Image (cartoon, grey):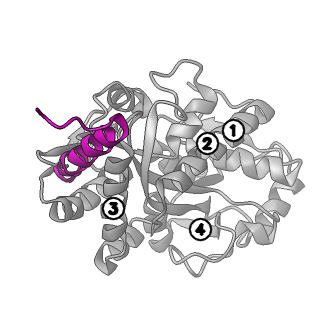
Amino acid sequence: MPKIIPSPLRKLALACCLVPTLALAQGAYPSKPITIVVPYPAGGSNDTFARQVAKELGEELKQPVIIDNRPGASGNTGTGQVAKSTPDGYTLVAVSSSMTTNAAVQAKLPYDPNKSFAPVAMFAKGPFIVAVNNEFPAKTPAELIAAIKAKPGQYNYASSGSGSVNQFGTELLKAQVGKLEITHIPYKGMGPAVTDLVGNQTQLLISSGPSLLPMVRSGKLRAVGITSLKPSPVAPDLTPMATAVPGYEFELWWGLLAPAATPPEIVARLNTAVNKALAKPALAANFLKEGAIATPMSPAQFGKVIADDVERWKKLATQQNITAD
């Protein structure tokens, strides 16, 4: 007669049998190529950082990591597609902080930045450069604020478009100064914005290092400050705007998301692999050349950055009447 195992012992025996099976299933990831969707055209910062991280991830995870550029709708097209993809760790999306500014000014998005994704890892953070044309009477943060205040409403600032991160950075400065009357001129992209700044059609532009530093170094523009709280290795010779406007800080970030409901063990595996990549001096040096500082953090920490930014930018958009095109 077969021996009958009492119910509690039977459950324990079954659990013991399942443990190796579960471990095997978890250990099998990844068992095929991983795709990182970049929701912008090739060549931009999202694409550059994603490709550099993808190379390192492929070596660490022993599987090809493929970059798939899916531009459209200010990054919303590709990001929305990943939000609806299978949450198995094989389709990810490389995003930047523009995802949170989009959420602040666009009523209908194909995703919820706080609910549609499982944060995986931050890649990097980077400050903006504050630049003026060579005819503008300011060389320091304090002189910039004083010059604008001396002629309220007579100067213009450029951005790459209404609701862009450039506009948010400048409107944050205006909000923290309290009263800074300077007119917003939105452009369709950074190229024409920089061109008109050089030509003195506009007088101020706050944008990324790669967008402005080449023009500064060639003498076509003047940098008066940087938007990090403290001096930054991105441009160590520039004075933080916070010296003239206490507390002012505006930095971009870039990172990796998975669809919501991706198993936590897969998220943890990816996070560990990304952070290992960021610890490599060569990768950190490449990021710095692009105006960013490698910034490893946990999935929970990255999730908090996203949630805090969404709330912060929604408040600023309401306060400063920032709207999208």
Amino acid, disc 4: Arg
Left or right side of 240 for 205: left
Cα distance, mark 3 to mark 4? 36 Å
Instruction: Indicate which disc residue 176 carries.
Output: none
Q: What residue type is labelled 2?
A: Ala
The answer to whether the residue labelled 1 contacts the one labelled 2, judged by CB atoms less than 8 Å apart, is yes
In the image, residue 146 sits, relative to residue 181, either above or below, namely: below
Of pointers 3 and 2, the one earlier in the residue sequence: 3
Query: To which residue does mark 4 refer?
Result: 222
**Which quadrant of the view contains residue 114?**
top right
Q: In this rendering, which labeled residue sits more in front, label 4 or label 1?
A: 1
For the record, the magenta segment spans 1-28
Q: Considering the image in quadrants, where does the C terminus appear?
A: top right
Q: Distance between the residues labelled 4 and 2?
A: 35 Å
Rendered view: 240 above or below 154: below
Q: In which quarter of the image is the N terminus?
A: top left
* Distance CA(mark 1)–CA(mark 3): 27 Å
Q: CB of mark 3 within 8 Å of CB of mark 4?
A: no
Which class describes the residues within 10 Å of circle 1: few (<14), some (14-19), or many (20+)?
Answer: some
In the rendering, which numbered label is found on residue 274? 3
Check whether the beta carbons of the residues at disc 1 and disc 3 lie within 8 A of each other: no
